[in-house]
Image (spheres, rainbow, N blue to C red):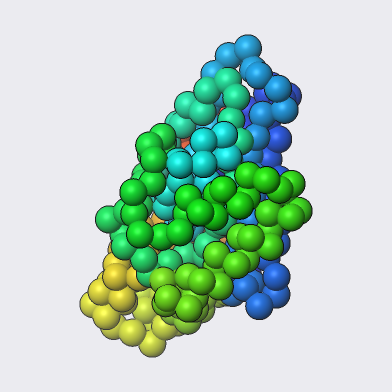
């Protein structure tokens, strides 16, 4: 199954901890992971997270201020998020295509304001704030079950098929053939369920794939790979791996 890399944390940062946990098996087709990002003490300088596009949607909870929460996702380029000198976030990362909530609520930038939507995010955040990360996972699972009941999170057989066969997809035509759809049908369905065009989805998934295998399995040549990597990630591949934990 698709396994995107975490957002970029600079190797020189020693007091920021990122933790992932896999969801229960009955949620594994919907949720990639539950995660926690927190400082272990107050930092001397502001911390900037290098957020990376992966076509996933996250629900984020600010545990330092439980009124702040939101639904987040990036499109096809990185974003630098200044989180300050101390912070504590917890979240749910959903696989591409499963989120069917209001796409107008999705942030593609820093989330720093109280949540004003209809989802029970503040109630959930208040429950989470009293627990350690292991215990938080049960509360996060409860929220996912609620989202399933409301049909705000659903199994997306089309994107699931694409993710499970990404090694065999090199073009949008390959994607159309795999899903048994015309290019026009695929465009409409993916835009509706993921917010991505087939071309942009392939661009992000192909770049993510290079962290797991040699880039020539996804790109025709080195210059094409470097150009795409820099545009999406903000750095050349060599500079990125030098700067961030991968």
The residue positioned farthest toward the top in the image shown: 44
Q: Identify whether 24 is placed above or below 231.
A: below
Q: Is residue 241 visible?
A: no
Q: Nearer the viewer, residue 198 or 191?
A: 191
* Quadrant of image for the C terminus: top right
Q: Nearer the viewer, residue 127 or 62?
A: 127
Q: Residue at the spot x=61%, y=36% of the render?
A: 88
Instruction: Say how many tags the image has.
Output: 0
Q: Position of residue 181 (x, y in %)?
A: 33, 84
Q: In the image, is 10 to the left or to the right of 49?
A: right
Q: Nearer the viewer, residue 95 or 4?
A: 95
Q: Identify whether 154 is placed above or below 126.
A: below
Q: Quadrant of residue 23?
A: bottom right
Q: Identify whether 246 is placed above or below 25.
A: above
Q: Identify whether 219 is placed above or below 144.
A: above
Q: Position of residue 210 (x, y in %)?
A: 58, 52
Q: Position of residue 169 (x, y in %)?
A: 48, 70
Q: Nearer the viewer, residue 218 or 242?
A: 242
Q: Residue at the spot x=58%, y=14% of the render?
A: 45
Q: Is residue 234 visible?
A: yes
Q: In the image, is 54 to the left or to the right of 171?
A: right
Q: Quadrant of residue 168?
A: bottom right
Q: Residue at the spot x=60%, y=67% of the render?
A: 142
Q: Residue at the spot x=41%, y=71% of the render?
A: 152
* Quadrant of image for the N terminus: bottom right
Q: Position of residue 108 (x, y in %)?
A: 37, 44
């Amino acid at each position: 199954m698709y396994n995107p890399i975490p957002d970029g944390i600079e190797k020189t940062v020693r007091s920021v901890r990122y933790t992932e946990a896999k969801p229960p098996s009955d949620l594994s087709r919907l949720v990639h992971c539950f995660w926690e990002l927190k400082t272990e003490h107050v930092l001397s300088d502001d911390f900037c997270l290098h957020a990376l596009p992966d076509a996933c949607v996250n629900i984020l909870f600010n545990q330092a201020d439980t009124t702040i929460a939101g639904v987040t996702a990036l499109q096809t380029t990185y974003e630098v998020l200044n989180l300050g000198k101390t912070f504590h976030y917890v979240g749910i990362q959903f696989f591409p295509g499963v989120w069917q909530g209001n796409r107008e609520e999705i942030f593609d930038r820093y989330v720093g304001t109280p949540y004003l939507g209809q989802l029970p995010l503040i109630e959930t955040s208040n429950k989470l704030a009293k627990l350690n990360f292991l215990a938080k996972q049960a509360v996060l699972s409860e929220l996912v079950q609620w989202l399933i009941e409301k049909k705000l999170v659903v199994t997306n057989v089309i994107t699931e098929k694409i993710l499970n066969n990404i090694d065999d997809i090199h073009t949008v035509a390959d994607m159309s053939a795999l899903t048994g759809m015309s290019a026009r049908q695929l465009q409409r369905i993916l835009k509706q369920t993921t917010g991505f065009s087939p071309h942009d989805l392939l661009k992000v998934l192909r770049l993510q794939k290079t962290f797991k295998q040699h880039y020539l399995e996804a790109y025709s040549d080195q210059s094409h790979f470097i150009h795409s990597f820099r545009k999406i990630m903000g750095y050349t591949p060599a500079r990125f791996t030098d700067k961030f934990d991968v």
